[in-house]
């Protein structure tokens, strides 16, 4: 398809990355974002809209969207892809029944069990369960407790403190009715993004996020403080195992559903010391910030890839991947993740955006707004990330950090050790 009109749903760094990559496609003649952010405004028309399905559909019809690309999980769990399907609009992102792979940890566990996919053993605990006996059964390693709801990153506690685990179990059962206690998986984490539809799938190069707030993987969990791609922990042999043991069975399961999975399946992996992969979690969207470092490595036209997946055309579409490494480092507001300070001016951003070249060194905006005087201000916890693409990790890293050094936000913090596992 040529002269396509595309709309991206969402407002974070991931959606800016999607817009950058779609804007580079000669197939796309009109790019929109809802609600978007100050970054997407540079190459797309942002729309303010009530984010429930009906008003969104009205907007998609009004702009005559040929393709809707849904960034975050919440609208998918709310049935936005189902609504698009009923309206005959191509949508990248799965229908609600399949989005529950992310919306419900229990549903994901049961899907993995039925597909024979390796993951941690678990117990479902409710008000009738003997919590102490369950904690005893998983003693000796940290306890992993997971709520069964979309909790914006706050639904999982991994702790060696028995009392903390017990309290989280009790409060979660109180609010949700039940909770999962899961065996701890030792190893190294990686993220694998698999674009799939009813006819086939493409695995994108594996990446690694940095979830802890501070250097050395210390401090509180965050949405992600930086990422790089590809991640060397996924060797060719590990990749083969991930394909055979996880991706192929999941694709068989998901493509055989009444409406096949059309979108990206994010597989959070733990790779153990023997190189055996286990699934930590599924998400039904691109990771953020994984998306920012994965898409720039995709040489295949981004519209063709996303539209292909939305319309069951993937088996016809070859995937081409660029050589090299992409890296992004997140600049976070003071107080992030617990209580980010918002509203402060971001200096140097205007110039950094002017000199940036997508695919070389560039900025992904997330929590950035513009005040009445036209000054960029921080509006969120994760404010922006500086990204680079190059031949080797070391030089790519120094390019991204050089760009970051030109941008100033009072009190902000960032990690200095993105990609440390690739440097060892
Ligand atoms: P999730 O929301 O399921 O991705 O969990 C958040 C984080 O908790 C993951 O990125 C892991 O670092 C950690 N985690 C979750 N499940 C396990 C597990 N079974 N073993 C070890 N760490 C885990
Ligand atoms: N960066 C992890 C996520 O998007 O869930």
Image: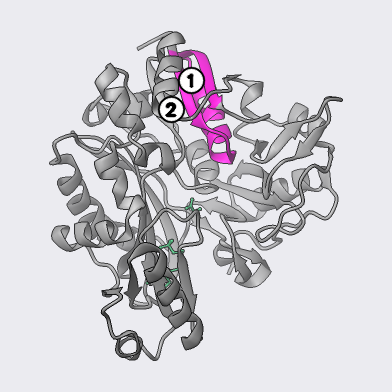
* In contact (CB < 8 Å): disc 1 and disc 2: yes
Position of the N terminus, as image quadrant, is top left
* SS label for mark 1: loop
Task: Residue 182: give its label.
Answer: none
Q: Alpha carbon of mark 1 to alpha carbon of mark 2: how far? A: 6 Å
Picture residue at 76% right of the left edge, 46% below the top: 342
On screen, residue 273 versus residue 252, left or right, reads: right
Above-or-below relation of 177 to 378: below
What scheme was used to colour the molecule? one colour
**Mark 1 Cα within 10 Å, few/some/many (few <14, many 20+)?**
some
Q: Is residue 136 above or below residue 9?
A: below
Whichever of labels 1 and 2 marks the residue nearer the N terminus, that label is 1
Q: Which residue is drawn at 24% across and 35% down?
A: 197
Residue sitting at 48 percent across and 15 percent down?
26
- 96 or 208: nearer the eye? 96
What residue is disc 2 on?
Answer: 302
Check residue 335 for magenta coloring.
Answer: no
Residue 29 highlighted magenta (yes or no): yes
Residue under numbered circle 1? 25
Range of residues picked out in magenta: 5-34
Residue 307 in the image: state x and y as whole percent. 34, 24
Foreground pick, 95 / 390: 95
Is residue 239 at least partly visible in the picture? yes
The vertical placement of 30 against 354, above or below, is: above
Where residue 253 sits in the image (x, y, percent)?
Answer: 16, 48
Q: How many residues crowd mark 2 within 10 Å: few (<14), some (14–19), many (20+)?
A: many
Provide residue 68's location: percent of width, then percent of height: 40, 24
Instruction: Report whether 368 appears left or right of 231.
Output: right
Front residue of 359 and 312: 312
């Amino acid at each position: 398809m040529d002269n396509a009109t595309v709309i991206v749903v969402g407002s974070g760094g991931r959606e800016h990355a999607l817009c950058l990559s779609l804007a580079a496609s000669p197939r796309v003649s009109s790019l929109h974002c809802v609600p978007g952010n100050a970054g997407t405004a540079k190459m797309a028309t942002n729309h303010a809209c009530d984010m429930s399905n009906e008003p969104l559909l009205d907007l998609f019809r009004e702009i005559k969207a040929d393709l809707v690309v849904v960034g975050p999980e919440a609208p998918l769990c709310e049935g936005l892809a189902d609504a698009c399907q009923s309206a005959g609009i191509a949508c990248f992102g799965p229908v609600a029944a399949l989005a529950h792979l992310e919306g419900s940890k229990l549903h994901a566990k049961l899907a993995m069990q039925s597909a024979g996919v390796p993951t941690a053993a678990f117990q479902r605990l409710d008000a009738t369960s003997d919590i102490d006996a369950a904690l005893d059964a998983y003693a000796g390693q940290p306890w992993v407790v997971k709520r069964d709801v979309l909790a914006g990153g706050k639904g999982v506690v991994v702790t060696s403190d028995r009392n903390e685990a017990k309290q989280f179990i009790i409060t979660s059962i109180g609010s949700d009715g039940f909770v999962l206690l899961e065996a701890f998986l030792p190893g190294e984490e990686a993220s694998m993004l698999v674009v799939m539809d009813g006819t086939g799938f493409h695995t994108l190069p594996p990446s690694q996020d940095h979830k802890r707030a501070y250097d050395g993987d210390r401090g509180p969990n965050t949405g992600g403080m930086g990422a790089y791609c590809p991640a060397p922990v996924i060797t060719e042999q590990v990749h083969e195992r991930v394909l055979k043991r996880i991706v192929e069975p999941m694709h068989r399961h998901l493509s055989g559903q009444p409406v096949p999975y059309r979108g990206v399946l994010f597989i959070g992996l733990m790779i153990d010391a023997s190189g055996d992969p286990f699934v930590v979690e599924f998400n039904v969207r691109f990771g953020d910030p994984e998306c920012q470092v994965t898409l720039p490595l995709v040489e295949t036209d981004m519209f063709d890839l996303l539209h292909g997946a939305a319309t069951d055309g993937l088996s016809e579409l070859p995937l081409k991947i660029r050589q090299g490494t992409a890296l992004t480092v997140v600049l976070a507001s003071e107080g992030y993740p617990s209580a980010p300070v918002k509203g402060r001016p971001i200096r140097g951003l205007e110039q950094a955006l002017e000199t940036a070249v997508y695919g070389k060194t560039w900025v992904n905006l997330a929590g950035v707004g513009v005040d009445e005087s036209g000054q960029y201000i921080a509006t969120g916890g994760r404010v922006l990330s500086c990204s680079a693409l190059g031949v080797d990790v070391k030089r790519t890293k120094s390019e991204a950090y050089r760009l970051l050094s030109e941008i100033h936000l009072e009190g902000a913090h960032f990690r200095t050790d993105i990609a440390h596992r690739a440097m060892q």
